Amino acid sequence: MLVRWTPAEGVRDAGPTAFRIGSPVHAYGGGCYAVVDRELWCVDDRGLYRRPRDGGGDLELVDSGAVGGLVAGTGEVLGVRETDQGDELVAVECAESSRVRVLAASAGFFGTPQPGPGFLAWSSWRVDDMPWDACEVWVAAYEPGGRLTDRRRVAGGPGESAIEPRWGPDGALYFVSDRGGWWNLFRWNGQEVQAVAPLAAECAAEPWELGYSSYGFLDDGRIAVVVQEGPRHRLVLIDAEGTAEPVALPYTSMKPYVVVDGQAVALIAASPTAASQVVLVHLGAGAPRVEVVARSEPYRLISAAVSTPTELRVQVEEDRQVTALLYPPTGAASGWRAPLIVRAHPGPTASCLLRLDWQTQFFTSRGFAVVDVDYLGSTGYGRPFRQALYGRWGWDDVHDCRAVAEHLLATGQAVPGQVFIRGASAGGYTALQAVAQDGPFAAATAVSAIVDPDRWAATVPRFQRAHAHRLRGGAGRVPAGLIHRPVLLIHGTNDTVATATDVQNLAAQLTDRDQPGRLLLLDSVGHYVATSHRAREALDAELDHYRSVIGEGKQHRDDYTAANGS
């Protein structure tokens, strides 16, 4: 649902009725709507639509197919259209004809185009790359209604991810590049590229979707940037001299959807005690003032007791630590000891998020501790760390999760025989591999899991195919014959990212071997079980899974204690 906010009216429904806005471009979508001269342009999985300025009448289908990355131009809407042959940069005239013009075509991929004064900028990457590995920023001369001329590559290429180009008020082109090991902000003045403010932090998110915006320009010349350091985000202001000053805010997680209006910065932000909120941060004279525009959680949950995390650094190798967020059971006193759920995030280039997660609270409010692990390959720690899992998938991620579990067992916070691992998507693969190897895990839950990296590389949507090829080469297919701990597989029948066939085959193999495994197949559910209409059913099944193991787990607990002497 699309909503509209004004200071006078507050939040009001602005979206077309009985219409689900969302883009199928690159499988993950993004950039699903734009407003040009008070006229709404939006997409769903069937194509691009326009709505009259008065908001009345039916939506008009302008172009069918996978369209996204919409941005308002002058008298036109610009965007990305995905076809069977690759990607196209398109311009759609706002005149009555709604004529669609193809500005550029590629067998690879395009990012959201950005119109500037007499120019158009965009990012692009090859079909055998991911945008966080090798991505280029391009610019061309362009006038609305015309064509692209004098195309020039500004930055990026093999070994460099250059993303999020945006025209500044000074007429220069800004973008984010990891050429120095971290995604930092750069500026191109038409002749040379200059670093804006070198930071040992990520100034952009891994671009899974189109339309990300990690920075914006204040009217006093400063640049507002969302910066990630490990699991923690903060808002930073960069002045003309390149000095970066953090803004004191009660938020630790911010999505890459920054919008600036004058001296106000709009964010989607959260903290360990507040679920995602749309906020306006007013940065005039004096201390920043936060205005909450909309909240994601029901009001009845705002004052609910929650578990807040401790940030851990666990030594996993002689020269490397891993970061984790440990949530104790809700209301636990100091010295607590509890069953533990180790969570491997998806991606695997994603990261732990330092924000209120009601799924975490579901388990902590029922006596479990939960720990989120930023294993090798996670975003937030620089380019080398992010790429280090290539060819090592199923080994190093499992090793890091195991090291965190063993650390918490050694400190006495986790209970032997009651340590579980769960993950979704790529994290589901990690969880399954973890119970096929030696370690402390008594059971695993795998949601929307990848089972066979080779088959996944052949069936995954075009956008993620290069990622699948680079990750594989580690532990390989999940070996059903080596799984001797109870496994719960949860999967949607409509999953197009990781199809259900491999999970069904794994479940059948476990049954044939009389090994402990259960499959919960969810009809009409896609890749994102947590946001589906069957989410509570999946949580209840996971809880029952752990409780059944705890009830039957004395023998494993005794075996682990005898082997480890603790």
Image (tube, rainbow, N blue to C red):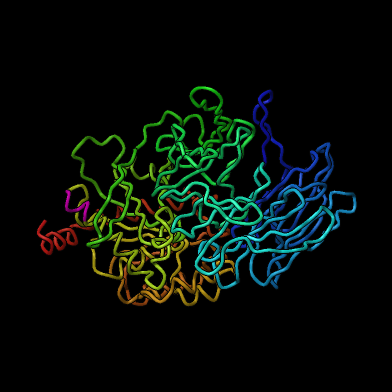
Among the 4 quarters of the image, the one containing residue 549: bottom left
- Which residue occupies the foreground of this view, 155 or 421? 155
Q: Quadrant of the N terminus?
A: top right
Residue 284, image x and y in percent? 56, 25
- Which residue occupies the foreground of this view, 26 or 90? 90
- Which residue occupies the foreground of this view, 313 or 303? 313
Instruction: Look at the magenta stretch and give its main secondary structure.
Output: helix
Write the residue at 66% across / 43% down.
170
Residue 408, image x and y in percent? 22, 51
Q: How many marks?
A: 0
Vertically, is 373 above or below 221?
below
Say whether residue 61 is visible.
Answer: no
Q: Quadrant of the C terminus?
A: bottom left
Most extreme residue toward the right is 96
Say whether residue 451 is visible.
Answer: yes
Among the 4 quarters of the image, the one containing residue 152: bottom right
Q: Is 414 covered by the magenta stretch? A: no
Residue 405, image x and y in percent? 25, 56
Vertically, is 239 above or below 102?
above
Most extreme residue toward the front is 191
Write the residue at 81% across / 61% down.
147
Q: Give the extent of the magenta segment.
A: 407-411
Vertically, is 467 above or below 225?
below
Please state if 27 lies on the left or on the right of 451 as rendered.
Answer: right
Please state if 232 lies on the left or on the right of 81 as rendered.
Answer: left
Residue 266, image x and y in percent? 58, 36
